[in-house]
Amino acid sequence: MRLYYKINTYGCQMNVHESEKIAGLLEGMGYSPCPEGEHADVIVFNTCCIRDTAERRALGNIGVTKAEKKRNPNVVIAVVGCMPQQDGAGEAIRQKYPYVDIVLGTRNISRLPDEIRRVLSSAQRRKSEGGKRYRGIDLQLPPDYLSTDESTPTVRTSYPNAWVNIIYGCNNFCTYCVVPYVRGRELSRSMTNVLDEVKRCVDDGYKEVTLLGQNVNSYGNDLSDGTNFAKLLHEIDKLDGKFRVRFMTSHPKDLTEAVMDEMASSSKICSNLHLPIQSGSDKVLKDMNRRYDRDRYLCLIEALRSRMPDIGITTDIMVGFPTETEEDFLDTMDIVRRVRFSNAFTFIYSPRKGTPAAKMEQIPYAIKQERISRLIKQQNAITKQLSDLYTGGVFEVLCEDVAPKFDNMVCGRTDSGRLVTFEGEPSDIGKFFNVRITASKSASLFGHKEEK
Ligand code: 5AD
Ligand code: SF4
């Protein structure tokens, strides 16, 4: 009889990649991915807690597994990652959801196989000898995390892109953000290990590598051997093979000239940067502890565009931070008009327990909502204008997937990160095409393959 697993992933790319490691661990135990319509024997929730909405979504779905446990008392249910790692949250989950067997934090995922075995053997014993079913919890942030992480197997699920982690944790403590509390301090992987992994991905046929970290620009700071992010990019660029390199996320305070130079001179590193601005108000940026101001951000944009005129720059923007007045919000609207981002991810500020901003006096929700809708409307118009500039041009596109909404169509991205949909078939996935852009619709472009 085959045993199946199902992983429900919430949150950022880091979590998507960590779920690939969870899949590696479970497949190592003999479990297979659960086909549609079958019941899983292990259900994992890899959670996020960056905003209240992310938490509520996960909690709702964890609640649904109560019925699954009733149907099959042997199913093992695990809640892992950021959500239980918050102060007191792991215990609260255990109490509120008695059918959850295992709770693991952000740096304990490699413990999952052992924990599953203990749950299963305690269930066996309980049948024959009575006693309690084992329930596991581990929320330590072990300092030797990197050594266990290096030996965790990975089942990659996003061909032709491969996620490669370069740094874990965050030292920045932006006042709104829960990440430093749940992911611990920065830990950089060694350059040799990162390069080996990138090489392996390319040898295995991956055509794009995305380097991951909460703040990739801090890469190497904790290694004290002179390693830094620019040097890492330089070494990756020297590797053989045709493949693309992207990275996320960059912090404006740490983006160096050397990194911009590497991006500009490299043939592999895409002209594409995600550079979260969060706010356009100097006062709010200060209250957020972002450690840059609007002038510094605008200088960075100029420095990037003078080196790479066609660079695609995306950002994260938050509205409704406790100290944000209408005037501060208008500063954000203004900087968004000046920079002209190719796309912006916009968020309503969500108070996170234990962070400094959560203790400040909060803005009414209706005001936040009204601000975000003004911001989205303005950014949509900019995104559309920038998309229109692509029409008529020919761009190299890596085919990444079948188009979700259209028959006989595929999709991929330009070097600058724009999504393009064009005619094609599943066998095109993983190949590069020159695509002529014939139409644009908000952030998406449409085109057809050019004869080579
Ligand atoms: N509320 C809303 N958005 C947040 N982000 C981080 N913390 C919060 C919060 N408490 C946003 C930031 C960050 C992105 C990943 O999530 O914009 O860049
Ligand atoms: Fe959070 Fe700031 Fe760290 Fe990003 S840099 S993870 S926003 S604390």
Image: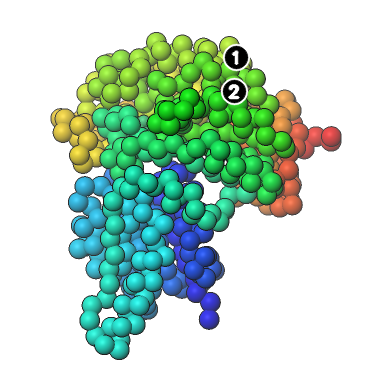
Q: Which residue is mark 2?
A: 263
Q: Which residue is mark 1?
A: 307
Q: Nearer the viewer, residue 207 or 141?
A: 141
- For label 2, being within 8 Å of ligand 2 is answered no
Spot occupied by residue 394 in the image (x, y as percentages of width and height): 74, 28
Which quadrant holds residue 393? Answer: top right
On the question of residue 445 being in view, the answer is no
Res 386 quadrant in image: top right
Earlier residue among tags 1 and 2:
2
Q: Residue at x 21, y 58 (%)?
A: 91
Q: Secondary structure at mark 1?
A: helix
Q: Which SS class for mark 2?
A: helix
Above or below residue 216? Residue 254 is above
From the viewer's side, name the closer residue of 86 and 344. 86
Residue 310's place in the image compared with 343, above or below, is above
- Residue at the far front: name it: 225
Q: Tell me the quadrant of the picture where the C terminus can be found.
A: top right
Between marks 1 and 2 in the image, the one whose residue lies nearer the viewer:
2
Label 2 packing within 10 angstroms: few (<14), some (14-19), many (20+): many
Q: Amino acid at mark 1?
A: Arg
The residue shown at (24%, 22%) is: 287
Q: Residue furthest bottom?
A: 128
Label 1: how many Cα within 10 Å (few below 14, some 14–19, many 20+)? some
In contact (CB < 8 Å): disc 1 and disc 2: yes
CA–CA distance in space, label 1 to label 2: 9 Å
